[in-house]
Image (cartoon, grey):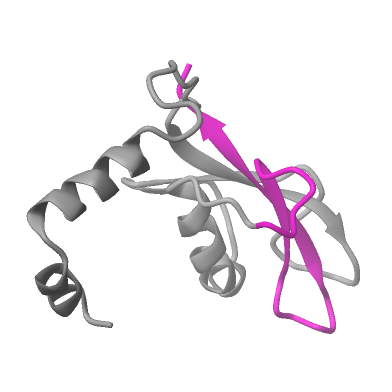
Amino acid sequence: MIRRQFCKTLSCAALGTISAISFGGPGFGKEVSMKKKVKAVTVKVINVKGTCGLHKVGDVATISESGVEGKICIHALYSMMSGAFAMLYDVEFPWLENPEKKTHACPDAANPVVFEIAKVREA
């Protein structure tokens, strides 16, 4: 049902009751602890197989709203941007054991590099 049709079928009193019920659920009025805002994500090389000419284990780059700091292959960066961007805006992927970190493999099948992408929160 379209929202406009739904609202037309109910009286104003009924809509007010629905609002009161939805705001009065469990936890209403309690203080909720909020996580600190994500200010950046770090991209760290955790495994290199083969011969990557650019990366070695331990290399770190930082991605923030203002750009990328550090050395990272453009092909790996391009392939991980959607996940890194989502993490920058605090998306939680339900399949991750730790929602603060995820891994990403470089698209070069002959010389794969595995990166760990981690959220960096404000202090």
User: In the shown orientation, is residue 73 left or right of residue 69?
Assistant: right
Is residue 101 on the magenta stretch? Answer: yes
Question: Which residue is at 9% across, 72% downward?
Answer: 8
Part of the protein shown in magenta: 94-123
Give the x, y percent position of residue 49. Answer: 90, 67
Looking at the picture, does residue 33 appear above or below residue 73? above
Q: How many marks?
A: 0
Is residue 92 on the magenta stretch? Answer: no
User: In the shown orientation, is residue 44 left or right of residue 24?
Assistant: right
Looking at the picture, does residue 29 appear above or below residue 11? above
User: In the shown orientation, is residue 6 left or right of residue 43?
Assistant: left
Q: Quadrant of residue 80?
A: bottom right
Give the x, y percent position of residue 90. Answer: 49, 45
Give the x, y percent position of residue 38. Answer: 46, 35
Q: Quadrant of the N terminus?
A: bottom left
Question: Which residue is at 16% across, 65% downward?
Answer: 10
Give the x, y percent position of residue 12. Answer: 9, 54
Viewer-nearest residue: 36 or 114 = 36
Question: Which residue is at 84% across, 83% downward?
Answer: 110
Q: Quadrant of residue 19?
A: top left
Viewer-nearest residue: 71 or 28 = 28
User: In the shown orientation, is residue 44 left or right of residue 67?
Assistant: right
Query: Of all residues shown, which one is farthest toward the right?
Result: 49
